[in-house]
Amino acid sequence: MLSLMRLVGQVSVARTGILLLTSYVGCKGLSAGHVFVVGASNGDMPRDPNNIKDVEISQFIVALTRTRKQCHVISDKWFMKPVDDRGKFVPPSEKTTFISYIPPELIEDKGNFKAGDFK
């Protein structure tokens, strides 16, 4: 998972500047008006919610503190689809436990979206 977070590169966005896709390590020292933390689901961030590593907490904090205006923490129910290659149902992922580190008054949960919601 977190393939977008592992991508490193820049995409030009017409008349609005640059969109930078980076890793946790790559974003250290940078800042942005809007930051998107993609793939914030248990099993990815953190890998094991029952055994959270200090480095995972540090990475999440680094991602959050790059923000000047608004941070968007995005989790997903399934990486690709709700079934595996054999057609067997895959249980949905849970939102990252790191969300509990953020004061509730700063969170605006937008709920779940489907691809068709973005037409």
Image (tube, rainbow, N blue to C red):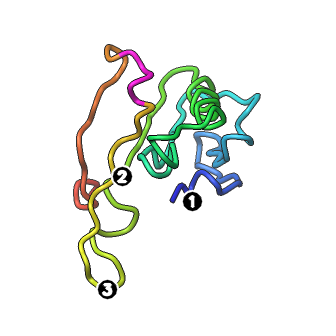
Q: Work out whether mark 2 precedes mark 3 in sequence or the reverse, and give the earlier one.
A: 2
Whether the residues at callouts 2 and 3 have beta carbons within 8 Å, the answer is: no
Q: Residues within 10 Å of mark 3 (few under 14, many from 20)?
A: few
Label 3 sits on residue: 86
Question: What residue is at 40 percent from the left and 62 percent from the top?
Answer: 79
Q: Element type at marker 3?
A: loop
Label 1 sits on residue: 3
Label 2 sits on residue: 76
* Amino acid type at image mark 2: Asp
Q: Nearer the viewer, residue 17 or 36?
A: 36
Question: What residue is at 66 percent from the left and 35 percent from the top?
Answer: 55
- 73 left or right, relative to 32: left
**Quarter location, residue 19:** top right
Residue 16 screen position, x and y as percent: 58, 39
Residue 91 screen position, x and y as percent: 26, 61
Magenta stretch in the rendered image: 99-103
Magenta stretch encompasses residue 101: yes
Question: What residue is at 34 percent from the left and 60 percent from the top?
Answer: 78
Q: Element type at marker 1?
A: helix
Residue 37 screen position, x and y as percent: 51, 40
Q: CA distance from mark 1 to mark 3?
A: 23 Å
Q: Work out whether mark 1 precedes mark 3 in sequence or the reverse, and give the earlier one.
A: 1
Q: Residues within 10 Å of mark 1 (few under 14, many from 20)?
A: few
**What predominant SS class does the magenta segment belong to?**
helix
- Residue 116's disc is none
* Amino acid type at image mark 1: Ser
